[in-house]
Amino acid sequence: MPTPPPASPEAYLAALPPERAEMVAAIRAVINANKPAEIVEGIQYGMIGWGVPHSVHPAGYHCSPDQPVPYASVANQKAKVSLYLFCMYVDDALPAWFAAEAAARGHRLDMGKSCVRFKRMDDIPLELIGEAIRRMPLDAFLARYTASIPAKSRPRRRAKTPKGTG
């Protein structure tokens, strides 16, 4: 039987080895300090995640409507800590900016389009992560996210029928 996910970000951190807990806690702190106020922290997909709650975006995540729209996540992996910046994934320019800024600041990143992996605390560009989060305010994020949803996955609106005809 699989291990249930931790119940809270604090429980997630408590289950980590000290070095990994330090890395995840530092990333968590910078995201919490820089995220839009409406974004909420919790456990999503078995890791610490930040998302747009249903009270703000009732449709939820198009891949799993019962889930909030993911904004960012951080996870302890076997050989690294992974930071998933979904807020960057929906913006074509932000990942290139992030990679260029990291290089200009002397950081060599192990990075996909929006996933950045770290092996040591010294590898984590905390200030840059904070800047990336600040560059994606909620309204811009939701507009880009909504535009990125494939047409076949978009919620369908029912046509309104005039009163007395249906």
Image (spheres, rainbow, N blue to C red):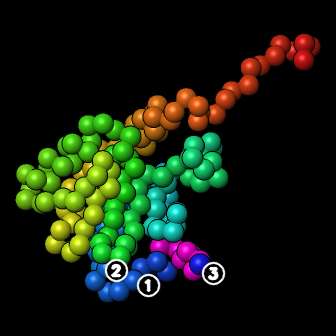
- What's under tag 1, amino acid-wise? Ala
Magenta-tinted stretch: 3-9
Asked which secondary structure carries label 2, the reply is helix
Q: Amino acid at mark 2?
A: Ala
Above or below for 46 versus 114: below
Seen in the picture, residue 7 relative to 135 is either above or below; the reply is below
Tell me the element at label 3.
Answer: loop
* Distance in Å between CA atoms under marks 3 and 2: 25 Å
Tell me which amino acid carries mark 3: Met
Q: Are marks 1 and 2 in contact (CB under 8 Å)?
A: yes
Mark 1 falls on what kind of element?
A: helix
Disc 1: which residue: 14
Q: Is residue 86 left or right of residue 4?
A: left
- From the image, state whether disc 1 or disc 3 is nearer to you: 3
Does the magenta run of residues contain 6?
Answer: yes
In the rendered image, residue 12, in percent from the top left (x then y), is placed at 46, 77
Q: Is residue 16 magenta?
A: no
Q: Mark 2 = which residue? A: 21
Of labels 3 and 2, the one closer to you: 3
- Callout 3: 10 Å neighbours few (<14), some, many (20+)? few
Q: Residue furthest front?
A: 1
Quarter of the rendering containing residue 27: bottom left
| Residue underneath mark 3 | 1
Would you identify the image quadrant in which residue 24 lies?
bottom left
Q: CA distance from mark 1 to mark 3?
A: 22 Å
Q: Nearer the viewer, residue 125 or 17?
A: 17
Mark 3 or 2, nearer chain start: 3
Position of 63 compared to 17: left or right?
right
Work out whether mark 1 precedes mark 3 in sequence or the reverse, and give the earlier one: 3
